[in-house]
């Protein structure tokens, strides 16, 4: 049973950071910029988000500094945000789980709609 819980927890916390309208189809030739524009943070200063996600709520910092323990990512966030602003790189973040999940579900709902309807079928 614990492995099932941790598996669902990981999937929830990783997918709501990457599969949103702003991040899912973003890209950049620069490796670090690509890490930033293809993810979002949520609830970075919220103890529940940090605890329940195991630090996965700070994906931008995690992808730029993969060897840094998650307990230090929140102190890196203001610095990374400042660097992104300086270099005109989009930095996506939402306040918490509710907004991150809403953004993810809106995106997946839109992905479930056929782009072209064939009237004959």
Image (spheres, rainbow, N blue to C red):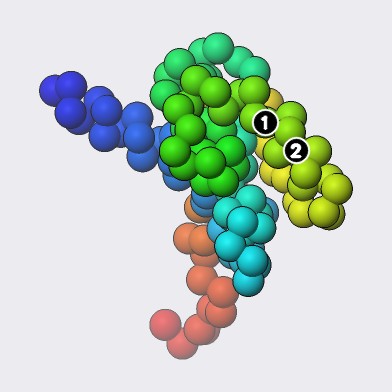
When the figure is inspected, residue 18 is found, relative to residue 78, above or below; the finding is: below
Number of marks in picture: 2
Camera-side residue of 88 and 100? 88
**Cβ atoms under marks 2 and 1 closer than 8 Å:** yes
Q: Secondary structure under badge 1?
A: helix
x and y percentages locating residue 76 in the rendered image: 65, 30
- Please indicate, yes or no, whether residue 16 appears anywhere in the rendered image: no
**For residue 58, which quarter of the picture?**
top right
- Image quadrant holding the N terminus, namely top left
Residue drawn at the location 63% of the way across and 71% of the way down = 29
Q: Residue at x 30, y 33 (%)?
A: 8
User: Which residue appears farthest toward the bottom when viewing the image?
Assistant: 120
Residue 82 is left or right of residue 52, and the answer is: right
Name the residue carrying label 2: 81
Q: Which residue is mark 1?
A: 77
x and y, in percent, of residue 92 in the image = 70, 43
Residue pushed farthest front? 67
The residue lying at 77 percent from left, 54 percent from top is 89
* Quarter of the rendering containing residue 80: top right
> Quarter-wise, where is residue 5 in the image?
top left
Q: Which of the pair 22/40 is nearer the observer?
A: 40
Camera-nearest residue between 94 and 114 = 94
- Tell me the element at label 2: helix
Real-space Cα separation, disc 2 to disc 1, in angstroms: 6 Å
The disc label shown at residue 46, or none: none
- Where in the figure is residue 34, as x and y percent of width and height? 61, 60
Q: Residues within 10 Å of mark 2 (few under 14, many from 20)?
A: some
**Quarter in which the C terminus is drawn:** bottom left
């Amino acid at each position: 049973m614990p492995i099932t819980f941790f598996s669902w927890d990981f999937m929830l916390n990783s997918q709501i950071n990457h599969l949103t309208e702003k991040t899912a189809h973003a890209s950049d030739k620069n490796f670090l910029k690509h890490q930033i524009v293809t993810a979002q943070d949520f609830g970075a200063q919220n103890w529940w988000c940090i605890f329940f996600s195991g630090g996965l709520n700070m994906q931008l910092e995690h992808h730029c500094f993969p060897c840094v323990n998650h307990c230090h990512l929140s102190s890196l966030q203001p610095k990374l945000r400042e660097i992104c602003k300086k270099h005109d790189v989009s930095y996506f973040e939402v306040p918490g789980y509710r907004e991150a999940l809403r953004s993810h579900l809106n995106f997946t709902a839109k992905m479930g709609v056929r782009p072209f309807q064939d009237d004959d079928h």
